[in-house]
Image: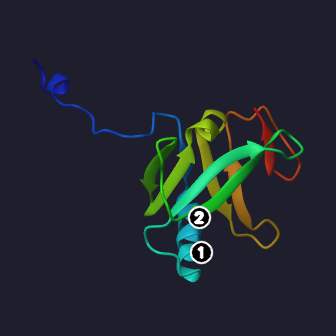
Amino acid sequence: MSEATTKTAPPTDQKPGRGVVLTERAAKEILRVISEQNFPATTWVRIGAKGGGCSGFTYVLDFDQQGPSEFDLGFPQHGVNVVVDKKSEFFMGGTILDFNDGLLDRGFVFKNPAATGTCGCGTSFSA
């Protein structure tokens, strides 16, 4: 038996190419807000989608003190604990969360490969 067949990959909640990926800039901004708001270090960032907006779904970004439940996927990235509910992950799998720090376009930006359309302001999408 070869070495490659005897080793197993470490378990993970995140399927390859799925979940929500944070850029380093997004993670740094989230950590800054957690520190500024005096949230505990165990705070999770909940990312998801809910019905609404002009394109069908609206992105959700919130802080969660409870962490993942059996209906969620949880995974750490760049020192940030991220949680995504499985229903949102279906519509947001592979999404990259970035942060723009420019004067005119400051804020979080979702780059969702599953989106078939977005609104002009980028806060809602259709899938």
**Lower sequence index among marks 2 and 1:** 1
Quadrant for the C terminus, please.
top right
Mark 1: give few (<14), some (14-19) or many (20+) Cα within 10 Å: few
Residue visible at 69% across and 53% down in the picture: 60
Asked whether disc 2 touches disc 1, contact meaning CB atoms under 8 Å apart, the reply is yes
Distance between mark 2 and mark 1 Cα atoms: 10 Å
Residue type at mark 2 is: Phe
Q: Position of residue 24 (x, y in %)?
A: 52, 61
Residue visible at 79% across and 41% down in the picture: 125
Instruction: Say which residue label 1 marks.
Output: 33
Asked if 37 appears above or below 92 in the picture, the reply is below
Residue visible at 72% across and 65% down in the picture: 107
Asked if 35 appears above or below 115 in the picture, the reply is below
Q: How many marks?
A: 2
Quarter where residue 5 is shown: top left
Quadrant for the N terminus, please.
top left
Q: Mark on residue 63?
A: 2
Q: Position of residue 30 (x, y in %)?
A: 57, 68
Residue, far top: 1
Residue visible at 82% across and 69% down in the picture: 104
